[in-house]
């Protein structure tokens, strides 16, 4: 039987340890899922590009980025709830989770899925990490200021747990002196308690210390004096205003001009019969109705069609279909704009140049080379230049971006503003280029200060989020290309901007207030634990002193305690109910003794019944004989309450005087 009990205890201990080891998995799942969710949220600027890549692979347009955002949010919410559950169990004093196997499997799946997607981003989409890093330049001061109140909230359970562990350690250290046989086990347990205190308290205080001094190492372009803030960056409408009209259509470019666009950005192909037209994708499936008109040619390269055929395609019906909207955050358009969008066709480059000439807007475009066996495969640049010159647009309004055959362009159209890519400063100086059009992620990580020091005019693409536009503004960028022109054009001041003095004030103020609150929280828990300990000690001392005989006091670790006889639960007409319990010395000497119902100090002076007392039945000899049997020793411990003068009494019997009896009192260890 004892072996079974021992085996059961060993099994229970193993289960307890295994359940306790599952806490790190909860923390890991929470950290990984939160990191993945943060990266995906902060890279919302790239959602369209991600959905477009998915469209190229699947042939169907849907918001895959939003689907993944929802999925990552579910993973984070689930791991957060489990972590809160584990925290509440610790708060309740339990150290084992006892999670269902289903939750354990899901927790491991969260860890695996989060790790898998982070690996995918690291291998195939490194730009996501670059965007998340840029977001920290903007949000770092605000994350710092908001993290300190969170640490104040966390300090409540941390203080409770640390002080609770300290109290438990002190109790075990005190008990070690009286448990010599378990000294080794007690020492091990005490060491574990100290180690647990260090494991909980040290990370908390290290993180808190880092948050207190982290402003010393923070650099944010949005923390600067107001007089040093540069002018608002100019805005190029990326393919017009693709959130207000079908991209690369005349309606889209008109909407961009209505919202104050500095310039218009587009993509140019050359048709098979040498007509430059506007199109972005490598085929016509997404932005035209070619699947209805010519399904077999839907995957063909745009330059393989003649302009006569291209001009018949509809380029706006897809835009008004809810399932084909290019941006998830598009606002509904009016009925008039919807009808106008449905009638849009593929425009020629000459149409855009005519609009830009009238509105005095700059034009920048990517020129895509024709496919193999195209009639103008090697001369397409010269043909496009001739079309631009024929449009009579002012040459300085053209930002010439293609690098192919640049010498011919300079000689033929010297007024074009030559634009380069992210070349080295030496290469830009050698080619006499003073304007660059670069991806914002590449520029911020590749010497922005050097290009600004060399007086290079910078245009960033593709900037859609207000926080990213604010970063470009604070960094004194000259212009950006955006899809979200209707939002960015309304910004009159960069988001998340603050002066250094204000940030220092907020830093010191939040640190000071949080330190006061944290000290107060720790003091409150320390005071609460001390009050509990004092209460328990006073309760224990009160019980001990209440049971001490008159004239007796505690002596160095032991007390002379005379326990009051408990009341009997039998009928008041039995002998046990009428007589007090016998002392041990009386039970040792059996004989024809009689009993006294009078307390010891009044035994020498028998009491007489009062006149109005109720006559009690006299115990019989049989009752006395039963009381003398050994089996009744337990009942001799019972007695009546102390008698008073105005209560019914019974006549005392002849018993030896208490002073003649051997004095025997139990020695009981005092309790703390």
Image: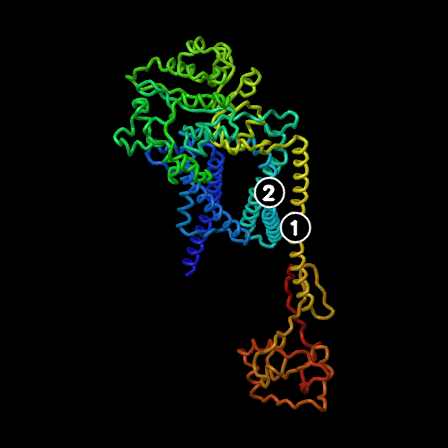
Picture disc at residue 151: 2
Q: Residue at x 30, y 22 (%)?
A: 306
Residue 129 seen anywhere in this rendered image of the structure: no
The N terminus: image quadrant: bottom left
Residue nearer the viewer, 415 or 667: 415
Residue identified by numbered label 1? 526
Residue nearer the viewer, 592 or 88: 88
Compared to residue 377, the image places residue 191 above or below, namely: below
Label 2 crowding class (10 Å Cα cut-off): few <14, some 14-19, many 20+? some
Compared to residue 319, the image places residue 583 above or below, namely: below
**Horizontal arrangement in the rendering, residue 355 relative to residue 636 (left or right):** left
Secondary element at image label 1: helix
**Residue 380, quarter of picture:** top left
How many circles with numbers are drawn on the protein? 2
Residue nearer the viewer, 397 or 118: 397
The C terminus: image quadrant: bottom right
Label 1 crowding class (10 Å Cα cut-off): few <14, some 14-19, many 20+? some
**Residue 11 x, y percent position in the rendering:** 42, 53
């Amino acid at each position: 039987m004892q072996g079974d009990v021992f085996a059961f205890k060993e099994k229970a201990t193993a289960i307890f340890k295994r359940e306790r080891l599952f806490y790190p998995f909860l923390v890991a799942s929470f950290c990984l899922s939160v990191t993945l969710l943060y990266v995906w949220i902060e890279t919302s600027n790239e959602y369209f590009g991600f959905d477009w890549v998915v469209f190229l692979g699947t042939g169907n347009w849907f918001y895959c980025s939003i689907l993944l955002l929802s999925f990552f949010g579910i993973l984070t919410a689930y791991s957060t709830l489990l972590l809160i559950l584990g925290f509440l169990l610790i708060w309740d004093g339990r150290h084992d989770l006892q999670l269902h196997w289903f939750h354990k499997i899901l927790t491991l799946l969260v860890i695996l899925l989060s790790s898998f997607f982070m690996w995918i981003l690291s291998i195939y989409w490194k730009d996501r990490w670059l965007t998340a890093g840029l977001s920290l330049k903007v949000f770092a001061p605000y994350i710092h200021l908001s993290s300190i109140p969170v640490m104040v909230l966390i300090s409540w359970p941390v203080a409770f747990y640390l002080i609770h562990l300290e109290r438990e350690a002190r109790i075990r250290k005190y008990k070690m002196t009286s448990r010599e046989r378990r000294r080794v086990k007690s020492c091990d347990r005490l060491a574990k308690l100290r180690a647990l205190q260090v494991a909980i308290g040290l990370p908390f205080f290290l993180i808190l210390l880092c948050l207190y001094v982290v402003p010393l190492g923070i650099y944010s372009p949005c923390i600067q004096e107001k007089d040093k803030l540069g002018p608002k960056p100019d805005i190029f409408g990326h393919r017009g205003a693709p959130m207000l009209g079908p991209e690369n259509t005349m309606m889209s470019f008109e909407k961009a001009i209505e919202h104050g666009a500095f310039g218009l950005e587009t993509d140019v192909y050359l048709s098979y019969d040498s007509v430059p037209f506007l199109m972005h994708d490598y085929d016509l499936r997404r932005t035209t109705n070619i699947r209805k008109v010519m399904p077999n040619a839907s995957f063909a390269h745009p330059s393989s069609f003649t302009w006569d055929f291209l001009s018949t395609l509809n380029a706006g019906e897809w835009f008004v279909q809810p399932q084909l909207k290019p941006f998830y955050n598009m606002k509904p358009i009016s009925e008039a704009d919807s009808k106008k969008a449905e009638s849009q066709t593929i425009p020629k480059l000459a149409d855009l140049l005519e609009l830009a000439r009238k509105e005095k807007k700059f034009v920048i475009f990517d020129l895509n080379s024709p496919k193999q066996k195209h009639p103008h495969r090697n001369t397409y640049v010269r043909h496009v230049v001739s079309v631009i010159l024929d449009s009579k647009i002012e040459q300085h309004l053209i930002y010439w971006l293609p690098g192919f055959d640049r010498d011919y362009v300079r000689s033929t159209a010297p007024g074009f503003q030559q634009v380069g890519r992210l070349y080295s400063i030496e290469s830009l100086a050698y080619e006499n280029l003073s304007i660059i059009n670069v991806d914002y992620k590449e520029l911020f990580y590749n010497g922005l200060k050097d290009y600004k020091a060399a007086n290079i005019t910078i245009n960033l693409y593709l900037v859609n989020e207000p926080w990213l536009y604010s970063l470009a503004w604070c960094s004194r960028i000259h212009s950006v290309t955006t899809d979200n022109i209707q939002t960015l054009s309304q910004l009159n001041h960069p988001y998340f901007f603050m002066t250094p003095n204000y940030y220092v004030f907020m830093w010191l103020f939040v640190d000071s207030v949080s330190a006061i609150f944290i000290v107060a929280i720790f003091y409150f828990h320390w005071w609460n634990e001390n009050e509990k300990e004092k209460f328990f000690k006073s309760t224990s001392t009160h019980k001990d002193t209440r049971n001490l005989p008159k004239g007796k006091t505690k002596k160095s670790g032991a007390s002379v305690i005379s326990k009051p006889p408990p009341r009997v639960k039998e009928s008041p007409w039995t002998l046990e109910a009428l007589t007090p319990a016998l002392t041990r010395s009386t039970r040792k000497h059996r004989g024809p003794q009689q009993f006294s119902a009078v307390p010891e100090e009044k035994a020498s002076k028998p009491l007489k019944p009062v006149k109005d007392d109720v006559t009690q039945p006299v115990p019989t000899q049989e009752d006395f004989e039963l009381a003398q049997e050994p089996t009744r020793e337990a009942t001799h411990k019972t007695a009546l309450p102390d008698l008073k003068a105005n209560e019914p009494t019974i006549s005392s019997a002849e018993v030896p005087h208490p002073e003649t009896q051997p004095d025997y009192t139990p020695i009981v260890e005092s309790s703390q």
